[in-house]
């Protein structure tokens, strides 16, 4: 096996991209892209920073984000585990990527751009839910939007009714990484009780 170390060699292997794969790219959030994004309750935020790269899942009970205009996406940051990996990255390097998904739909919408973190109360209040607001809002300036073809989701049959069994729980991961200092059953039980009440 030979490593590919140049863009020229890579292009020789794969060839030129198909026309449609370039046509689908928009420099702004077009009406159809906006409608799709606003109907998505889940996205993955990818960032790059001083410690490497991170991808974190984001979701909400309605839309995962707001799209106030054709070049801006607002992503709320609700209370969590306070690792703030993605937020640290954004402070260090504003480049971000978003991947939006919708259950049952095999397309994926990708957004690339730059981001800043804002704690303006008026901005946070746009996401008010049950009297609570996010801690901050990630304000993304859009550079390009495109849909990803459905092949990966179709191959994986992601939305199939058949779900894998025997997957480790959060408590089991913690028990493994703490050499048993954290009890899996206790952690999972506590989370199932307190989790829904502390989501916002």
Image (cartoon, rainbow, N blue to C red):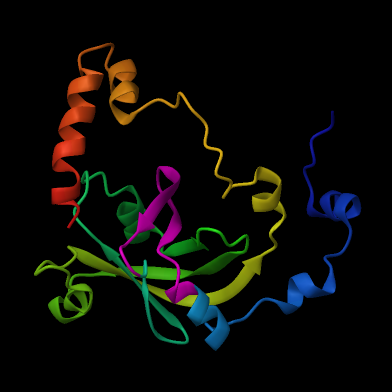
- In the displayed structure, would residue 7 be above or below residue 141? above
Horizontally, residue 145 falls left or right of residue 175, namely right
Q: Position of residue 122 (x, y in %)?
A: 16, 81
Residue 109: x percent and y percent? 57, 67
Residue at 43% from the left image edge and 47% from the top image edge: 54
Is 10 one of the magenta-colored residues?
A: no
For the record, the magenta segment spans 37-62
Instruction: Identify the residue at the far top of this view.
Output: 179
How many marks do you count on the picture? 0
> In which quadrant of the rendered view does residue 144 lie?
bottom right
Q: Position of residue 77 (x, y in %)?
A: 26, 61
Foreground residue among 102 and 30: 102
Position of 168 with respect to 6 (left or right) is left
Tell me if residue 140 comes above or below residue 148 in the rendering.
below
> 67 and 87: which one is in front?
67
Residue 200, picture quadrant: bottom left
């Amino acid at each position: 096996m030979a490593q590919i170390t140049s863009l020229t060699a890579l292009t020789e292997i794969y060839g030129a991209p198909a026309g449609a794969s370039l046509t689908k790219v928009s420099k702004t959030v077009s009406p159809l892209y906006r409608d799709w994004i606003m109907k998505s309750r889940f996205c993955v935020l990818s960032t790059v920073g001083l410690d490497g790269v991170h991808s974190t899942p984001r979701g909400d009970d309605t839309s995962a984000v707001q799209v106030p205009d054709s070049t801006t996406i607002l992503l709320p940051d609700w209370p969590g585990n306070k690792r703030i990996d993605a937020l640290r990255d954004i402070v260090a390097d504003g480049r971000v990527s978003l991947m939006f998904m919708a259950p049952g739909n095999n397309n994926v919408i990708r957004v690339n751009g730059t981001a800043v973190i804002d704690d303006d109360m008026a901005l946070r209040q746009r996401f008010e839910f049950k009297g609570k607001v996010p801690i901050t809002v990630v304000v993304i300036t859009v550079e390009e939007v495109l849909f990803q073809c459905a092949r990966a989701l179709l191959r994986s049959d992601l939305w199939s009714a058949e779900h894998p069994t025997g997957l480790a729980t959060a408590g089991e991961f913690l028990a493994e990484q703490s050499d048993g200092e954290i009890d899996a059953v206790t952690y999972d039980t506590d989370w199932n009780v307190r989790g829904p009440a502390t989501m916002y």
